[in-house]
């Protein structure tokens, strides 16, 4: 939603607009990562029966539909899809909600704002209950993928930095009334939650024949949000619209595709509108009466952060320029020569957590410009924050990142080695720096507990580099007398790990 990426399913007692049962069964089975054979075994049916039902060659029995709904935890959706396939299904029309049984989305509007570091989506839906039962809750999904098409990278990222409910700061309302919500699924990059039509002051179910407008929003840092935003049509919908709002200085370009469960992606059938709003650019797109199962995906890139453009901007021609564009403070700024302020923990845990999140987001922006075979680190002063925090990504991409708050070296080995280092704050050169092969580092956890870690070889070098930043030192301060940095063009170790015997 790496780019976000939400799609919603309602919890209603209605059948109208539910996809054909075979298609719905396929969706839920794949969503639960079950093979046909595994599903059939869990239900007590032959696998061929599942294949025939999904392909539409054989109508499902009532017993099959009820068992499939239970095994796949579909919360009634499959049962309603089976009912929709029956002879008593009411005909729907696009002329108005009064002739439609079940929940209908009269207006679905999604707005995504980006301020340079954080994405904030807002979803607004005007609903009509054309069914026979009151609606008391609404299921939403939040799914992100920082690296579409590269699941290994995305999986490693979200293992290291899973989305949390606290970070998402989900809030919702119905016709102005705050809504309670409760988690349904909680995975590293995927969340489901029930929005409940009630709060501490009372209940406000959506009764048959009534309309309500539900709004909800959340936030995700750009280190875990990819350059895409998808809307999926899972209810009868009269109008769907999407709006993207980006800083104009990023020079965004936006395009879109349409796909479904049975068709490959094609360009959007109507153009995306671009308008200027002060220092922001707005991209809007809408469609009427989208078909069930359709998925609309908007994608973008920021040309001001793109070093692969046909005509690179002057300010992005050098490595240091690209780091500056990624938000890294450059050599000469006074903050790089001062000692960072320590955190009072646990009292300042919230502030520390925010700084850590901003550091990880900056690291992801930096990775878009360079391959770090030796691992990488980033200290808070390098993103303009005068606090004693640093994060380190080890050379092993599967290893957990190291977070250091108020770190200090309490012991260093007498054995050293000399290796080339680079610094994001002056990335056009590399310098040969001697450092201890082993460090003992004391740092503080968010809960205020002091801990000591022992770091060796590459991790000791990375940690030493970042801790120096927190005390106003650069690696050039540690180079041997008479030794000077070399231009990055003359350096031959880019993309390779440091060598240790």
Image (cartoon, rainbow, N blue to C red):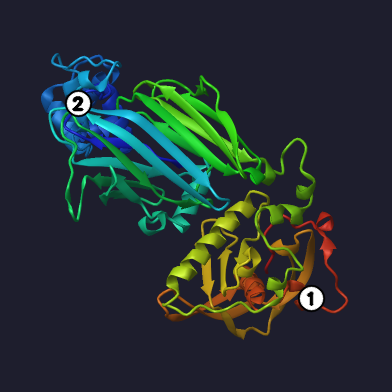
Q: Quadrant of the C terminus?
A: bottom right
* Observer-nearest of 479 and 318: 318
**As drawn, 372 above or below 153:** below
- Element on which disc 2 rests: loop
**Above-or-below relation of 469 to 270:** below
Residue 245 horizontal side relative to residue 44, left or right: right
Q: Position of residue 31 (x, y in %)?
A: 33, 36
Among numbered discs 1 and 2, the one appearing first in the sequence: 2
- Mark number for residue 479? 1
Could you tell me residue 371's position as x and y percent?
Answer: 66, 52
Can see residue 283? yes
Count residues near mark 1 (Cα–Cα under 10 Å), then give few for <14, some for 14-19, many for 20+: some
Q: Residues at badges 1 and 2 in contact (C-beta under 8 Å)?
A: no
Indicate the quadrant where residue 214 lies. top left
- The one nearer the camera, 4 or 188, is 4
Total labels drawn: 2
Q: Residue at the location (85% across, 70% down)?
A: 484
Residue 443 x, y percent position in the rendering: 51, 79
The vertical placement of 73 against 78, above or below, is below
Q: Mark 2: few, some, or many residues within 10 Å (few <14, many ≥20)?
A: many
Q: Residue at x 52, y 69 (%)?
A: 403
Q: Residue at x 46, y 42 (%)?
A: 4
201 or 294, which is in the foreground? 201
- Expressed as whole percent of the image width and height from the top left, the position of residue 121 reads 44, 44
Q: CA distance from mark 1 to mark 2?
A: 74 Å
Horizontal relation, residue 491 to residue 258: left or right: right
Residue that appears at 60% across and 68% down: 385
Kindly state the secondary structure of the residue where label 1 is placed: loop
**Residue 139 lies in what quarter of the image?**
top left
Q: Is residue 232 left or right of residue 315?
A: left
- Residue 130 - label: 2
Left or right of residue 484, residue 168 in this image: left
């Amino acid at each position: 939603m790496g780019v976000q990426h939400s799609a919603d399913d309602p919890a209603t007692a209605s059948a109208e607009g539910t996809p054909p049962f075979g298609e719905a069964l396929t969706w839920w089975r794949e969503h639960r990562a079950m093979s046909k054979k595994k599903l059939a075994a869990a239900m007590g049916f032959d696998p061929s029966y599942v294949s025939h039902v999904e392909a539409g060659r054989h109508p499902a029995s009532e017993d099959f539909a009820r068992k499939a709904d239970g095994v796949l935890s579909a919360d009634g959706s499959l049962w309603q899809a089976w009912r929709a396939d029956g002879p008593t299904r009411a005909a729907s029309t696009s002329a108005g909600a009064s002739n439609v049984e079940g929940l209908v989305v009269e207006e679905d509007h999604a707005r995504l704002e980006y301020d340079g570091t954080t994405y904030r989506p807002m979803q607004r839906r005007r609903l009509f209950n054309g069914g026979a039962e009151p609606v008391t809750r609404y299921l939403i999904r939040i799914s992100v993928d920082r690296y579409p098409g590269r699941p290994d990278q995305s999986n490693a990222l979200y293992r290291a930095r899973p989305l949390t409910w606290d970070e998402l700061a989900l809030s919702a309302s119905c016709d102005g009334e705050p809504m309670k919500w409760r988690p349904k699924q909680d995975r590293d990059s995927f969340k489901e939650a029930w929005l409940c039509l009630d709060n501490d002051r009372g209940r406000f179910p959506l009764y048959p024949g009534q309309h309500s407008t539900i709004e909800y929003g959340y936030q995700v840092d750009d280190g875990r949000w990819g350059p895409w935003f998808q809307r999926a049509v899972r209810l009868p919908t009269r109008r769907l619209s999407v709006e993207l709002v980006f800083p104009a200085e990023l020079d965004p370009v936006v395009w879109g595709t349409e796909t479904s469960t049975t068709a490959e992606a094609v360009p959007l059938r109507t153009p995306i509108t671009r308008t200027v709003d002060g220092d922001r650019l707005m991209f809007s797109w809408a469609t009427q009466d989208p078909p069930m199962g359709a998925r609309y995906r908007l994608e973008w890139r920021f040309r001001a952060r793109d070093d692969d453009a046909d005509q690179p901007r002057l300010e992005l021609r050098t490595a240091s320029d690209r780091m500056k564009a990624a938000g890294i403070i450059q050599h000469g700024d006074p903050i790089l020569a001062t000692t960072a302020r320590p955190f009072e923990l646990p009292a300042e845990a919230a502030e520390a957590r925010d700084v850590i999140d901003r550091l990880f987001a900056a690291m992801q922006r930096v990775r878009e410009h360079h391959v770090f075979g030796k691992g990488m680190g980033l200290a808070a002063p390098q993103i303009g924050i005068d606090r004693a925090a640093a994060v380190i990504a080890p050379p092993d991409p599967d290893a957990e990142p190291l977070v250091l708050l108020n770190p200090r070296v309490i012991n260093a080995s007498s054995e050293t080695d000399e290796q080339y280092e680079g610094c994001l704050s002056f990335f056009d050169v590399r310098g040969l720096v001697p450092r201890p092969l082993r460090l003992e580092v004391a740092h503080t956890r968010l809960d205020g507990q002091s801990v000591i870690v022992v770091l060796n070889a590459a991790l000791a070098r990375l940690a030493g580099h970042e801790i120096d930043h927190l005390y106003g030192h650069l690696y050039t301060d540690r180079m041997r007398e008479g030794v000077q940095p070399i231009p990055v063009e003359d350096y031959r170790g880019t993309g390779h790990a440091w060598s240790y015997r």
